[in-house]
Image: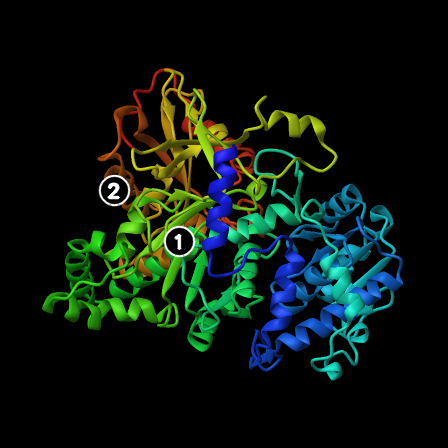
């Protein structure tokens, strides 16, 4: 550990951006940047409006003063419920400025779910985004123990205070600095609690991950070290800020003086890409999968377009390794493919992105290869809420396709006997809020955090994640099957939105498939299949044959015990709102197995006598 600490200190001295000790240090850096367009936000007419560094400082100062006037103090917790918008960042920084900790809560949760978290965290103040969020919270207010509610939108209803009232006159202070406020910011200690982030509960009840200023700062000091982010960069904040991945990216951008554009609705993202033209994109795999599916669906409109895409992918695949290393080939075929196909794919992201990064869920080798084949190096990273979040990351300096990159310089890792990844370092949290039992379970006697992920480390130190330990399926024959790589292969098809393998304790593996309905319905029309309803569509023999072919194609590359013997196409889209997906687009397997219990039972009804050797 002593040698590790020395290496960390040496690296800190070599960093171009000085290290921070607290998130408040980061905010002070934002205030000092004097960036005239530090933040962009969309007004009611869809026009992008700037917020300067000075305005950020004054608004945070004003909101922090309001919190203090209500008796909030160091160690308190303040709930934050809202979409990605500039007021979210102001609330975050203002809460930390007074020594309190914020509790970001997904706005998609129900009022009852929110009340449970607020009560568990002991929040007396909540900040919500819209009237809809206020009404939801107000309906359970008696159960929550809340004393005050601030609403970002105006006008505020009875029982809430409009944020605009609290920020009135703040911008007029210009570049004026408040020594007392600055001293309060500087008084924060690395060991102080900064945030309670409740995990999404894919396999159990949510737990509050307690992250300190030091945890987050340590990750900030190292996560982007191999990237050359500067004040000329721009990114769009669209992944839910209640998720640590999105919040950490915003902090990175603020830390280097880059511009952040807030996109509050996912369906506005394509237009925002065109207008903001970001230089950095961090997305969950589903974002990239949707771009790929859109390209393939568009090309299928004509035989010529389909042939051009196929030819361009063939050209690109011969140079995929070169592209993934961050370089561009130079040949006549490449330049032609670049003009006809690759440039158009880049335009879907705004045309200016230098760094494409994927995190939050496993990317899949096929997706990484596809993007490399259209000239885009899509670098995958890995982390957990409990690790603030980044554990490993591919970068322009060090990358290996199929891996999640090299571990951060401030992180130690090793593998347990069963292959579970164990990590240790200053960005690893110390425990779950008021849950000593759960905390004890996730650390081994030597203080290593059990990630719950099965991993391998190659001879060069690159880390690869195989699957979640708790999600491995064990057949009745004793074979372990990792579902995520197989599901990712199915999702490479334009017709598959989501797939969930089932078969734990059963004789063979089956899969539930949620189609990409726009693509499937378009295909059905071309095939002369009347689309009466989705329920009727997924039971049509021609649709079943289509998906049977997809399953057979995936099976061709699997070991016998992994092959999918049966499948069921469901007539539903799986979304975060309908409860099957987490905010980072991971499957909620427990929800799916409960929701489709009847369908799963039918797949295995004749298991005792079925050979189950063909998908049907």
Tell me the residue at 76%/63% (across/down).
Answer: 183
Residue at x 66% of width, y 29% of height: 438
Q: Secondary structure at mark 1?
A: loop
Percent across and percent down for residue 285 are 41, 51
Q: Which mark is residue 338?
A: none
Specify whether 608 is left or right of 401.
right
Viewer-side residue, 421 vs 183: 183
Please identify the quarter of the rendering in which residue 342 is found. Answer: bottom left
Q: Position of residue 192 (x, y in %)?
A: 72, 47
Q: Name the disc covering residue 549, or none.
A: 2
Above-or-below relation of 567 to 343? above
The disc, 2 or 1, on the residue closer to the chain's N-terminal end is: 1
- The residue at which mark 1 appears reads as 516
In three-dimensional space, the C-alpha distance between marks 2 and 1, rounded to whole angstroms, equals 16 Å
The image shows residue 486 at horizontal and vertical percentages of 34, 37
Q: Quadrant of the C terminus?
A: top left
Residue at the image point whose x is 52% and y is 51% from the top: 575
Please indicate, yes or no, whether residue 573 appears anywhere in the rendered image. no
Name of the residue lying farthest toward the left: 332
State the residue in front, 362 or 58: 58
Q: Position of residue 328 (x, y in %)?
A: 22, 63
Applied colour scheme:
rainbow
> In the image, is residue 35 above or below residue 290?
below
- Residue 428 visible to the viewer: yes
For disc 2, the neighbor class at 10 Å (few under 14, some 14 to 19, many from 20) is some
144 sits to left or right of 190 = right
Question: Toward which corner of the image does residue 334 lie, by quadrant?
Answer: bottom left
Q: Quadrant of residue 512?
A: top left
């Amino acid at each position: 550990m002593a040698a590790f600490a020395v290496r960390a200190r040496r690296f800190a001295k070599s960093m171009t951006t000085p290290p921070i000790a607290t998130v408040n240090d980061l905010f002070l850096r934002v205030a000092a940047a004097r960036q005239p367009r530090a933040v962009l936000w969309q007004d009611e007419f869809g026009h992008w409006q700037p917020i300067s560094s000075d305005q950020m400082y004054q608004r945070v100062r004003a909101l922090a003063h309001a919190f203090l006037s209500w008796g909030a103090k160091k160690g308190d917790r303040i709930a934050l419920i809202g979409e990605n918008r500039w007021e979210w960042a102001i609330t975050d920084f203002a809460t930390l400025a007074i020594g309190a900790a914020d509790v970001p809560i997904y706005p998609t949760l129900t009022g009852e779910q929110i009340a449970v978290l607020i009560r568990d965290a002991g929040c007396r103040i909540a900040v919500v985004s819209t009237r809809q969020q206020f009404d939801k919270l107000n309906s359970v207010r008696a159960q929550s123990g809340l004393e005050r509610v601030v609403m970002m939108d105006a006008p505020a209803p009875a029982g809430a205070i409009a944020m605009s009232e609290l920020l009135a006159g703040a911008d007029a202070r210009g570049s004026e600095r408040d020594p007392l406020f600055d001293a309060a910011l500087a008084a924060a200690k690395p060991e102080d609690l900064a945030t309670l982030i409740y995990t999404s509960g894919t396999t159990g009840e949510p737990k509050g991950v307690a992250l300190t200023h030091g945890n987050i700062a340590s990750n900030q000091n190292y996560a982007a070290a191999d990237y050359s982010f500067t004040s000329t960069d721009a990114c769009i904040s669209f992944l839910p800020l209640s998720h640590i991945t999105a919040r950490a990216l915003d902090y990175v951008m603020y830390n280097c003086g880059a511009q952040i554009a807030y996109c509050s609705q996912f369906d506005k993202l394509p237009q925002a890409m065109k207008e903001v033209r970001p230089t950095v994109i961090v997305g969950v795999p589903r974002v990239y999968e949707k771009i790929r599916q859109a390209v393939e669906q568009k090309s299928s409109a004509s035989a010529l377009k389909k042939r051009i895409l196929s030819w361009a992918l063939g050209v690109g695949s011969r140079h995929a390794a070169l592209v993934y290393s961050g370089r561009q080939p130079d040949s006549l075929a490449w330049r032609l493919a670049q003009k006809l196909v690759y440039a158009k794919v880049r335009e879907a992201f705004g045309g200016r992105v230098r760094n494409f990064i994927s995190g939050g869920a496993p990317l899949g080798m096929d997706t990484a290869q596809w993007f490399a084949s259209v000239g885009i190096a899509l670098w995958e990273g890995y982390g957990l809420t409990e690790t603030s979040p980044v554990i490993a990351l591919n970068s322009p300096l060090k990358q290996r396709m199929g891996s999640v990159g090299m571990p951060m310089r401030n992180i130690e890792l090793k593998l347990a006997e069963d292959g579970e990844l164990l990590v240790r370092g200053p960005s690893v949290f110390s425990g779950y809020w008021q849950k000593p039992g759960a905390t004890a379970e996730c650390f081994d006697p030597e203080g290593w955090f059990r990630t719950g992920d099965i991993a391998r480390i190659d001879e060069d130190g690159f880390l690869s994640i195989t699957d979640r330990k708790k999600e491995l399926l064990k057949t009745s024959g004793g074979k372990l099957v990792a579902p995520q790589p197989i599901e990712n292969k199915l999702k490479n098809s334009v017709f598959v939105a989501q797939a969930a393998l089932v078969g734990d304790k059963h004789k063979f593996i089956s899969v539930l498939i949620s189609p990409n309905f726009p693509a499937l319905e378009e295909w059905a029309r071309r095939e002369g299949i009347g689309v009466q309803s989705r329920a009727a569509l997924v039971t049509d023999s021609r649709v079943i044959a289509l998906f049977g072919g997809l399953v057979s194609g995936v099976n061709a590359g699997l070991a016998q015990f992994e092959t999918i013997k049966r499948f069921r196409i469901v007539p539903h889209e799986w979304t975060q709102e309908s409860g099957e997906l987490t905010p980072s687009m991971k499957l909620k397997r427990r929800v799916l197995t409960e929701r489709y219990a009847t369908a799963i039972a039918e797949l295995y009804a004749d298991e005792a006598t079925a050979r189950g050797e063909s998908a049907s």
